[in-house]
Each structure stands twice: as C-alpha cells, then as structure tokens.
Image: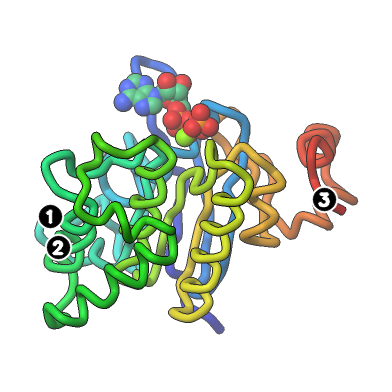
Amino acid sequence: MAEDILVLKDVVKSYNGQRVLDGISLVVKEGEHVSLIGESTTGKTTLFKVIVGLVPPDSGQVIIFGHDITRMNEFQKRNLLKNIEMQFQSGALFDSMTVRENIRFILDEETHLSGKEKETIIEQLLRGVSLWNASENFPYELSGGMQKRVAVARALSTSPRLALFDEPAAGLDPVTSARIIKVIKALVAEHRMTIIVATTNVLMAQQFAERFVILKNGRVHTDGPWPELLAKGDEYTKKFLSRDLMR
Ligand SMILES: Nc1ncnc2c1ncn2[C@@H]1O[C@H](COP(=O)(O)OP(=O)(O)OP(=O)(O)O)[C@@H](O)[C@H]1O
Ligand SMILES: [Mg+2]
C-alpha cells in the first residue's frame, strides 16, 4: 500500500470573517496525481498555501509524510517542507535574482548536489521550458507567461516528493501550454513525484490526472476518477465537468 503523503483533516480558514476553506478533508497517496478543480475563488490557491505552511489554518490538521505541520516549530516545518515545492499562480519569483539564480537559490537551499550538478539541472529545465536564452534575465524583463514557465521549472528543480502546480499553463498560448504540460509530465514520471494541479479548467485537469477533487464553496464537493464523476456525479458535478471535458 502506498504511503499517505498528504492528509488534510477538516481544514478551516477564514479571511475577514468569510470562510474560504470550510472543512477540507483529503488524502493523497505517494505517487498519486490529483487535479484540484473548482471555479475561481473556491479556495484552491489558499489550500495550497496551507499545505506549504504559508497560511496557518484556523483549525484542522495538515499532515505531511505523517507529521502534522500545524504542530511544528518553524525549524521542523522548514525541514519537512524541503520535500514539497509549489509553483505559484503569480510566479512569485525573486525580483533581484536572474532566472538562473531563481532556480539555483532553491537548489542551494534544499539539496546537497554539487555546483556542476545544479547547473546541469538548471540548463535542462530551462531548455525544457524554452527559456535557456533568458537565463540571465531578471523576472521584470520577462512576460507573464515566461515568468510562469520559470516558476514551473523552479518547482520541478529539486524533484520534490510532492509538487503543487497552481494554474501551470493558464494564460499561455496553446503550443507553449502543450510544451509545459509535456515537461511537467515527463519529469513527474521520471522522478515518481506526487502532484496536485490546481486549475479552473477541466480540460487542463484532464491532462494531468484522472482523479478529480472538485472544490465548491470551500469544501470538497466530490472526489474520484472523472469518468465516474461524469457518469454518476450530481447535477453540479456533471454540469461543471461537461463544460469542456474531452470524452
Ligand atoms: N490573504 C488574503 N486576504 C483576504 N482574502 C483572501 C486572501 N487570500 C485569499 N483570499 C480570498 O479567498 C478567496 C479564495 O481565494 P483563492 O485565491 O484561494 O481562490 P482560487 O480558487 O485559487 O481562485 P482562482 O481560480 O481565481 O485562482 C477569495 O475570495 C479571495 O479574495
Ligand atoms: Mg488560485
């Protein structure tokens, strides 16, 4: 039996008195690929931030590799979270570092690889997302789509056990989008990563995972393989999935 890599138990988070996460429970096993889908503002990004310890939940448990991060001190948390990477929807690159340095920084912080090994990884990844030519550029010199591709490369760089991608291909042209999806899938397969991909786009979700977790009003509305949800889900689920799902 695969290990539970992530267990969320009744996670609640409110902003300004409004419940964004209203009791989320979820189990993800090692090696699983999950698409976290839901309309805008259903709390996908907030949930990711809770998982990577950036946003403390008001209540509930966030258990990663068997350890509840809500009960850990900063040092313990940082050590555990070295095994997780998140690609932020906004990119969230370090403005004062070049593209290459943005990735190198994470590799320096979180791995014990040699300088040469790190540079090889950086080159492979940047070539993979077609940005090797921009490696010495600063984020402000790049388009939004280019920044997103750097963020994807950065999240993959350490081959984390758990990788979270927040709208990894939104806003990219179809050719670039297909290329990024291919790069992510190849590396995920090679390193047997567990991934969760957040998106509003059902077609995109389908590219990454058969298991769909659909969020609605800050709760897990339904969870299962998409063909099953499409056949047996409730009215909302069927309508949501059939908007643009490939059959
Ligand atoms: N730091 C914050 N302070 C106040 N409100 C917040 C904060 N972060 C998120 N919210 C609110 O929480 C809700 C959920 O936001 P979140 O970004 O998690 O949604 P999402 O599902 O990722 O949406 P999208 O698909 O548009 O990315 C929104 O109403 C948002 O305004
Ligand atoms: Mg979001």
In this view, the residue in front, 122 or 87, is 122
Q: Would you say residue 21 is visible in this rendering?
A: no
Mark 1 surroundings: few (<14), some (14-19) or many (≥20) residues within 10 A: few
192 relative to 242, above or below:
below
Say what amino acid the circle numbered 2 marks. Answer: Gln
In this rendering, position of residue 4 left or right of residue 112? right
In this rendering, position of residue 210 left or right of residue 148? right
38 relative to 224, above or below:
above
Is label 3 or label 1 in front?
A: 3
Q: Residue at x 83, y 57 (%)?
A: 227
The residue singled out by tag 3 in the image is: 246
Q: In what quadrant of the picture does the N terminus appear? A: bottom right
**Cα–Cα gap, marks 1 and 2:** 5 Å
Mark 2 surroundings: few (<14), some (14-19) or many (≥20) residues within 10 A: few
Q: Would you say residue 209 is visible in this rendering?
A: yes
The residue singled out by tag 2 in the image is: 76
Q: Find the residue positioned furthest to the front.
A: 133
Q: Residue at x 12, y 78 (%)?
A: 115
Mark closest to the chain's N terminus, 3 or 1: 1
The residue singled out by tag 1 in the image is: 73
Mark closest to the chain's N terminus, 3 or 2: 2
Q: Determine whether the residue tagged by mark 1 lies in a helix, strand or loop.
A: loop
Q: Determine whether the residue tagged by mark 3 lies in a helix, strand or loop.
A: loop
**Cα–Cα gap, marks 3 and 1:** 45 Å
Q: Position of residue 42 (x, y in %)?
A: 54, 30
Discs 1, 2 touching: Cβ within 8 Å = yes
